[in-house]
Amino acid sequence: MTQLTDKIAIVTGASRGIGAGIAQLLAKRGATVVVNYNSSPDAANAVVEKITSEGGKALAVKADVSEEEGANELVKVTVDTYGKLDILVNNAGTTRDNLIMMMKPDDFDVVLKTNLRSTWLCSKAAVKTMMRKRYGRIINITSISGIAGNGGQTNYSASKAGIIGFTKSLAREVASRNITVNAVAPGFVLTDLTKDLPADITSKLNDNIPLGRWGAIDDVAYSTAFLASDEAAYITGHVLVVDGGMAM
């Protein structure tokens, strides 16, 4: 089992869904986790309470990581509190789906800012401290939409494809300092937002998944925990697709 004992981790957008699942699993594996949120303090505190109730260590920190000040402050609070930063999981994201003919410029800009710009800003802030320690693990949560595209998601797919290019470029920049940079690309994942979809829709989507089921949050979390570990020390610039075979 992948162990992360004594590691300090930040998970952005960790108050619910995939981010919360990743934060909880990293804590179970021994990491101290900073649970980042922007507008859901109760949900973030619930994640922290769950982690601590199971014997883990966690801290909720509010920050708008799509803004430079917020990303810098998140990393600063983490380093000031714990003395270092070992793992950064860039998970913060949003969607504003629509066909391109009806998509407003603001819908495009907000998604690119929340998904892609936040990944760049948080990584930039984290790399400064990781380079001094000559150690770091950065894992960016992208999507198969950034690989295969998806109708009605030109903004979202562009942001997630950008994360893939960003991941590969940053991996080259920081490899000499023992910092790895990888991405996880989930397919359809069951969350609170998707679990109540009508059965006919989920059945139709399942037909396109060779493994015959939607992914679970833990499927993404396990992949992330592996890339965050020393067991993945020789993997960098890689995109780990977690989609049940849908995009192959």
Image (cartoon, rainbow, N blue to C red):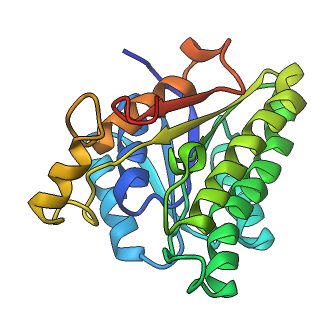
- Kindly give the residue lying farthest to the left in the view shown: 199
Q: Is residue 79 visible?
A: no
Q: Image height check: is 198 above or below 58? A: below
- Kindly give the residue lying farthest to the front in the view shown: 101
What residue appears at the point 59 percent right and 49 percent down from the top-left corner? 146
- Residue 35 drawn at (x, y percent): 48, 57
Residue 1 position by quadrant: top left
| Number of dots carrying numbers | 0
What residue appears at the point 69 percent right and 62 percent down from the top-left corner? 118
- Of 53 and 197, nearer the camera is 197
Q: Image height check: is 12 above or below 165? A: below
Residue 239 position by quadrant: top right
- Of 192 and 105, nearer the camera is 105
- Residue 157 drawn at (x, y percent): 59, 57
What residue appears at the point 59 percent right and 83 percent down from the top-left corner? 103
- Residue 176 drawn at (x, y percent): 89, 20
- Residue 60 relative to residue 79: left or right: left
Q: Is residue 26 visible?
A: yes
- Residue 188 drawn at (x, y percent): 34, 48
- Of 62 and 184, nearer the camera is 184
